[in-house]
Amino acid sequence: MDAIVKNFPVLDNASDRPTQKEAEDAVRVLLRWAGDDPSREGLLDTPARVAKSYRELFSGYDLAAEDVLGRTFEEVAGYDDMVLVKDIPFYSHCEHHMVPIIGKAHVAYLPNGRVLGLSKIARVVDIYGRRLQTQESMTAQIARVIDETLAPRGVAVMIEAEHMCMAMRGVQKQGSTTLTTTFTGTFQTEPAEQARFMTMLRGFK
């Protein structure tokens, strides 16, 4: 089944965003709702700290993966086999509960005359990770942007992650891991390439 990729709207106008003060006031409301006193000494600076940390944790909204992938290289000396970057760590947040998703991404593509700088792939993972996410959407988004920007023969993405919304709340099952995959092009149409991708992932630890 093809992955469905939704491009969720992002506030691109600074005037649409609440001010720093409004963000800090919202944190104070949450602290009071949780049962604590935001005016006590230990919490006086917490609203400002939370707002600052959110700027960093959700900085992916201010970046475009297409811009990161804009520069490619054509001098590849005839290389046209799989390029795999594995074990890319990321930290994201569940869009349903706003608690962490901690995992690693594995990204491969089959060049079609052009290649990417390897750090660009890690940056793309980081951009999509630093947004409110579902793991399924993040997997498909990474594959889509590489496929559309680089136009390779195929893209393969696997994400392995632990969801704190399962570990910290609800069923409270620590240590469970969720795996998601998206394949495009040759990876999608040729099972042998999918199998080779999986073999390369598991064969080099």
Image (cartoon, rainbow, N blue to C red):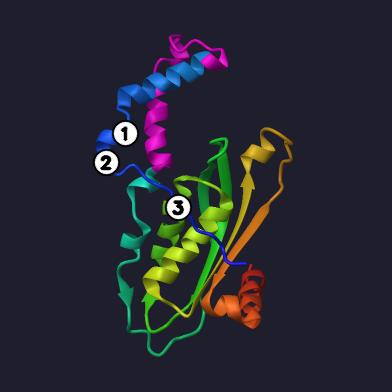
Residue ID at (49%, 65%): 143
Q: Is residue 96 left or right of residue 131?
A: right
Q: Along the line of sight, which residue is nearer the eye, 2 or 21?
A: 2
| Residue 84 can be seen in this image | no
User: SS class of the residue under badge 3?
Assistant: helix
What is the magenta range?
33-58
**Callouts 2 and 1 close, C-beta under 8 Å:** yes
Q: Is residue 47 magenta?
A: yes
Q: Which one is closest to the eye, mark 2 or mark 3? A: 2
User: SS class of the residue under badge 1?
Assistant: loop
Q: Of the numbered discs in the image, which one, if any, rests on residue 17? A: 1
Of callouts 1 and 3, the N-terminal one: 1
Residue ID at (40%, 69%): 148
The location of residue 19, given as percent across then percent down, is: 30, 27
The location of residue 176, given as percent across then percent down, is: 71, 48
Which residue is tagged 3? Answer: 128
For label 2, count other residues whose C-alpha is less than 10 Å away and answer few (under 14), some (14-19) or many (20+): few
**What secondary structure is the stretch in magenta mostly built from?**
helix
The image quadrant of residue 86 is bottom right
Which residue is tagged 2? Answer: 13
